[in-house]
Amino acid sequence: MPHIPTDSDVYEVFAQSGHGTALNHVGSIVSPRPDAAWHLAKETYGRRDDLVKLWVVRRTDMIVSSADDRGLLAAKTRMPYRQPGFPTARRRDRSASPPAVAAPREGRDSGLTERRDDAREPGLTDLWLALADDLFVLGNRLGEHIVDYIDLEEALAVGSIGQEALAHAGTILVLCGFDQPAADARFFDRAQAQWQVSRVVERLTDWPSLVAGGLVIAAAVAVLAEQTAEAAQTAGAEQTAGAEPGAAWLPAITAIRDEQLVHLDHWRRWARALAAWPETRTEFARAYAEVTERAGDMFGARPQSPAQGVPAGAAPAGPALAVTLHERLAALVGENGGPGSRLPDGPGTRTWGVGGSALADSLSRGRTVRDEYAPGVFS
């Protein structure tokens, strides 16, 4: 993780030598005082060249990456969907293979077979699959709002969050043992009655509700990622993708958590703005109240039958886990600076077949794209 260096007398020097050049890091110096550090930097790095700017920063005031952050910084492997040619390659790969259906795993509903209304308390993997569905719908809904802003930076932020929501949903399925055709089948071939999204999804029909829903979903993903990281650190290294979370999950889960926390900061900023503007204050307060009231089912707690118990090898799950996750969610959702949350005091139950027009429109759009584009169009 990024860290703060401890060399209090070391200063990093950044210089710009011309109006058309960038401000670059040129070296380091050691000095007992900040003012002396600047003058020493000028004498050291500006004796032979005219400088336009000279910045001197104490090393302990900087947050820098470490060797463990390479995976988080590697955009080409962490976010392949942003690389040139990725859509073409995905279309070509999909058109060359027949649709695949993920085989149901023992003790868990794949989402492609008939649903099972069993009483088994969901484990961490079940909760991730549920949140993957929520992220998929959120990403699709955000795609409709990319062009709603005059401010280019805001439009780019909406697009980036939408892309990463979809990418995180796909990454979660890979961790849970789905290959790419099976992931496509799970997202695009299930009828709405076979989805078990949070009731929050039903309300993702306008921008104020998307801000509230995005905030809640980002907070839930961050909370579950933190819980999963704790479980993975104590699990055996022999656990791999497809099992309950083990050491193999840590890099991807850590990246998802960090990126969703960035998303959460964006949602909070938008929430504060909507709550402050007289034109949107009332509408957003109503949307935020309705969304948070529906968010009690985010972790899908279900009563456990004493006769069934938890499958062998599953991470500890039960009412205590659901309550813990719900309490962490309430803490994050409450730190928004906007209207008050109506999140229920305890976790609720996810219901089959909800999602309303938000889910129906997302499924319809995806299926239309898959059906209408002829093989080879993108090759």
Image (tube, rainbow, N blue to C red):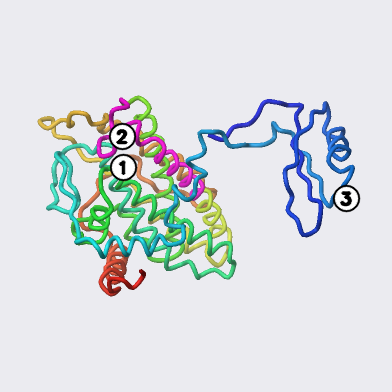
Which residue in the structure is indicated by mark 2?
245
Which residue in the structure is indicated by mark 1?
175
- Corner quadrant of residue 234: top left
Cα distance in 3D space between marks 1 and 3:
54 Å
Front-most of residues 179 and 351: 179
Which residue in the structure is indicated by mark 3?
50
Residue 84 placed where, x, y %? Answer: 46, 61
Left or right: 81, with 356 as reference point: right
Residue drawn 48% across the image and 46% down it: 259
In what element is the residue under mark 3?
loop
Based on the picture, tell me whether residue 86 belongs to the magenta stretch: no
Residue 323 placed where, x, y %? Answer: 32, 35
Q: Nearer the viewer, mark 1 or mark 3?
A: 3
For disc 3, the neighbor class at 10 Å (few under 14, some 14 to 19, many from 20) is few
Verify CB contact (< 8 Å) between mark 2 and mark 1: yes
Instruction: Give the magenta part as a residue range.
Output: 236-264
Residue drawn 75% across the image and 29% down it: 10
Front-most of residues 24 and 35: 24
The amino acid sitting under disc 2 is Pro
For disc 2, the neighbor class at 10 Å (few under 14, some 14 to 19, many from 20) is many
Left or right: 79, with 306 as reference point: right
In what element is the residue under mark 1?
helix
Cα distance in 3D space between marks 2 and 1:
8 Å
Quadrant housing the C terminus: bottom left
Front-most of residues 105 and 73: 73
Closer to the N terminus: mark 3 or mark 2? 3
In what element is the residue under mark 2?
loop
Closer to the N terminus: mark 1 or mark 3? 3
